[in-house]
Structure formats: structure tokens, C-alpha cells
Image (tube, helix red, strand yellow):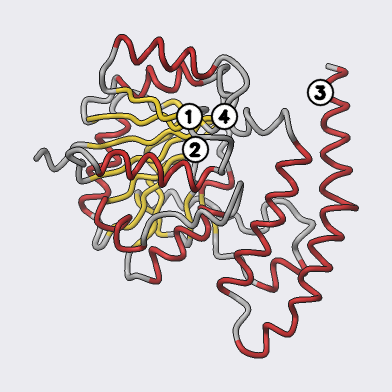
Amino acid sequence: MNPNAVDAVVVSYDSASTIDASLRALLLQPELASVRVVDNGSRDDTVRRVEAMAADDPRIVLIRQPGNPGFAAGCNAGARAVARGEPSPWLLFLNPDVELPAGALARLLAHAAAMSRCGALGADLRDADGRRDTAARRRDLSLWQMVLAAGRRGALDVEPDDMLVVQPVDACSGALMLVPRAAFDAVGGWDAGYRLHVEDLDFCRCLRAAGFVVAVANDVPVLHHRGVSSRARPFFVEWHKHRGLWRYWWRFEARGATALLAPLVLAVLAARLMFLAWPAAALRAVLRRQR
């Protein structure tokens, strides 16, 4: 077995505007062995586009989910489908709005192989104007941040340290995550109890608890269009983001006497959702329609 072979998992939902470019860039990476596109019930042209590309490249396998069980469940479905064949040593979880430049996968693999106990390696995500995605490097979510910094975007973000080629972090973004198959199996995959958002924080925390290292390769810039499929359903997204925050806090932070703070945490999250997140989502929707 090729020690540098990679099986990719791409979870799609209404991703027709970006998935062609994302898959084309992925297929140009020589280390790619296969790509499972797990579609979570797209209502646009996503499935037809993937089927057309799969007809020309047998490495692409489309998996159509019944309904939309969420991003984490989609990642697990893709990883399980790979495991039924001859799985590669590496899994790449990739959003359908991410485009890998030439040689990016080789550089990520080299960095990951040189790490001690690599659990997950992310990349330096950037938008079309070259601006860094601050959510590419994050710290663990804590009670303090949930209650006091819940209304501030970027409360978990960590500044890139360009003195480090590979920067250890608490969590990297689920938009691009290179994971050894052994590490994935060791933690049992993603927690499918999350529907959307926060599942990458959970997954990285589980990896670190199992003794693995999570990091970001600062010298591998990757284009991330970010949030393309989320814009059509901002209220749905915010609801599940807040559900994810609650699930994460209950799983990791509600220990001993801290669990008595559950009513306060729920109240803060409900207030943030109703009085901050949903009004902000409505305003963004109005501004987009006026453009």
C-alpha cells in the first residue's frame, strides 16, 4: 500500500456553484486515491455535476444520503464507504468550497508524516482576495467563552504564528482536515449528534484526548470560499450552530458542580440566538438581496 495515498471525503449540500472547481483541483493531486462525495440531499444541480465528473474519473464515487443528517454524519458515511474497500492510510475531509493548489496535498502529507502522533492537520485557509480565514486555527470552547464571549465573532480564533511552519492548535477547521486513518478509527470518527458547526471542535478535542496532535500547516495556503451552502438557510444554520454549542459544552465542560450552570448556559445561548444571531442573519439576507 502506498503510504502517501489519500482517500478524500467531500460532504456536499447545494454546492453546485463551487463543487466543480473543488473536485477538479482535488483530482489533480497525485496522491489522491479516491474521493467519496457524500451528498446530503442537495436541491440544486450538485448531484448532476458530480455524476458527470464521476463518469469521466472512476476515483469519484457519489453517495446520496436520505435527507440531510448533517456534516459529521456525512463525513462518517464517506469514511465507512472507503473502509469497505482497500482504505488508504490517510483521510482528507474537504469542503466543496475549498480548492487545493498544485502540490498542496503532497506538502500536507510531508508535514503530517513528520509530526509525532499526528491526529489532524489543517491548512492556511484564505479567501479569494488572499485574506486569511481566522477560523482555521482555534482554541477549545470553554464555559467562559460561551457565556462572556458568545456575542463576539472570532472568540476562539488563534493568530497564525508564521515562525512555525506547522503550528500546534487546539482545533483546525473541518473545511480541510488531513487525518491518519488510524487516528480516525481510534476516536470512532465524528460525533454525528452535531448537525452543523462545532463538530470539528469536538473531533479535534477527542483526538487530543486520545494522545494525538492537532496542527495547521502555515505554509500551505488554500482557497476557501466559505459558507456558500449556508447562505441560503441562515436561520437553520444559526439554530444548529447553537445546538452544537450546547452539545459541546455538555459533553466536555459540564463536570461536577459545573453542570449546575446548565440553565444559565441554555439561557445565554437562547438569548444570543433570538436577539443577536437571528436578527443579524435577517439583516445579512436583506443586504444580499439589495446587492
Whether the residues at callouts 1 and 2 have beta carbons within 8 Å, the answer is: yes
On the rendered structure, is 274 left or right of 244? right
What residue is at 68 percent from the left and 51 percent from the top?
Answer: 241
C-alpha gap between disc 4 and disc 3: 25 Å
C-alpha gap between disc 2 and disc 3: 24 Å
Give the camera-side residue of 7 and 26. Answer: 7
Q: Position of residue 216 (x, y in %)?
A: 41, 49
C-alpha gap between disc 2 and disc 4: 27 Å
- Packing grade of label 1 (10 A; few <14, some 14-19, many >=20) is many
- Mark 2 element type: strand
Which residue position holds label 4? 41
- Mark 4 element type: loop
Mark closest to the chain's N terminus, 2 or 4: 4
- Of labels 2 and 4, the one closer to you: 4
- Of labels 1 and 2, the one closer to you: 1
Q: Type of residue at label 3? A: Arg
- Of labels 2 and 3, the one closer to you: 3
Q: Position of residue 68 (x, y in %)?
A: 58, 38
What residue is at 60 percent from the left and 76 percent from the top?
Answer: 253
Q: Quadrant of the C terminus?
A: top right
Q: Type of residue at label 2? A: Leu
Mark closest to the chain's N terminus, 1 or 4: 4
Which residue position holds label 3? 288
What residue is at 49 percent from the left and 13 percent from the top?
Answer: 48
Q: Quadrant of the N terminus?
A: top left
- Of labels 4 and 3, the one closer to you: 4
